[in-house]
Image (spheres, coloured by chain):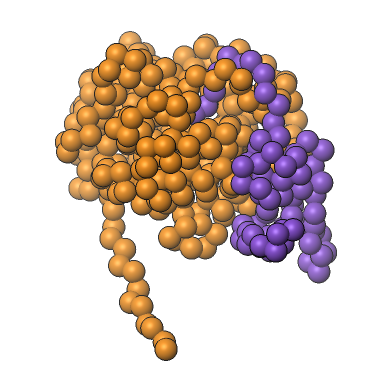
Amino acid sequence: MPAEDPGRRRVVVADDGPVLVEGPVEIDLPDGSSVLADRPVVAVCTCRRSSIYPLCDTSHRGRRRRRKENP
Amino acid sequence: MTTTLPPAAERLDRPRLPAPRGELSAAVCDLLRGGTGSFPEVTPSDPFGHDLQLALALTSELHYRGFEGVDDDLEWAPAVVAARHAMADHYLAALRAELPGGDDLDDVVADLLVEPADGTGISYHLAGEGTAAQFAEYVAHRAHYHRKEADPQSWVVPRLQGAAKAGLVTVQHDEYGAGRAAAMHSTLFADMMTELGLDPTYGAYLDRTSRWVLAEVNLQTLCGLRRSLRGASVGLFALVELTSSPGSARLVRAARRLELGPATERFYAEHVEADAVHEQVLRRDVLRPLLALEPELAAGVVLGLQAGSYVGDRFSEELLAHWAEGRPSLTLDAA
């Protein structure tokens, strides 16, 4: 995940979910509030369905009938 | 003003040997107490039975914290190694026979990334109608994994190289609190146990833990420690990270509905956020480079994903069956 050049931060645009950013980051929101995320990689929600927006909670996942679940 | 805080006193937390559950676990307890008797034939035993899984867990625990009053040197004593290996092989053979197998990793992963519209597991039950006592039972069972989170996956690190190793350690660093002991997931779990009125002592519920949780951690340990099963080790790790976020979100809802407290909410909320990231890192920075380097490991990774799902589903069925009959799945009183 980290960029090869240590002077740069890598941002990975996933084709099926969040944008991955090297942390720690401060995410400024339109209402003037900020979210501080300290982990080494931060997943920023792009589908806007996340219940912990602006961070990803995997709500972008498709839903269909399936036979099992865990946990 | 400057406040100087004394260093947090940490106490060595080693479990005691639990009471055996049958012939094999009794024989292991005897070995660990210095006995030199012969070990019973393993193959007549139920490979998924409580006796074998507890016996295997006791031999595995020597790789982790050991036991109070048990010689640490027994970890690699030939008699213990032979017993451990025989039980692990019997278990593995039975597990393989239950699984569909194959090596189409993309297909198995894609299936895991779809949320069922009609899910029915433990987290659904607890989010919807479960009781605080059932939540506590679930946590007491899961302690066997979470109080050593993410130690079973650490065994595989030296068995990987390059990009896959770097990706896996990125996730491990987060599991271990990114340098802060108080933020280690195993510590957050202990905080939750205390809040729920459970005993957070390492191994406190080992004698009562579901055989399926013992089976899950036994598999993680043995795959991590066998180079030939390193693909399965990564697969088991990937399963945890791929499926944890939605289940943890349901457990956050359960904790709020039942008003269980901030430490309980925090543990599962942390996993919603962390495992949404870990899923991406596992897929992009672990599985992808691992399979590019060693494509023949695909079947092993699939084995890990399927085996982890299998034992997880049996655990879920066991608890839900108890609760459907109004029976607790374990007693929470002091042993």
Residue B287, can we see it? no
Residue closer to the observer: B316 or B129:
B129
Q: Residue at x 82, y 46 (%)?
A: A13
Give the colour in which the image draws chain B: orange
Give the colour in which the image draws chain A: purple
Question: On the rendered structure, is B254 left or right of B195?
Answer: right
Q: Residue at x 26, y 27 (%)?
A: B330
Horizontal and vertical percent position of residue B320: 38, 19
Q: Is residue A52 above or below residue A8?
A: above
Q: Residue at x 41, y 37 (%)?
A: B257
Horizontal and vertical percent position of residue B78: 35, 35
Horizontal and vertical percent position of residue A20: 74, 50
Q: Is residue B286 above or below residue B313?
A: below
Question: On the rendered structure, is B298 left or right of B133?
Answer: right
Name the image quarter holding residue B205: top left
Q: Is residue A20 above or below residue B60?
A: below
Name the image quarter holding residue B104: top right
State the residue lying farthest toward the front: A31
Total labels: the figure holds 0
Residue B54, can we see it? yes
Horizontal and vertical percent position of residue B25: 26, 26
Residue closer to the observer: B158 or B152:
B152
Residue closer to the observer: A28 or B59:
A28
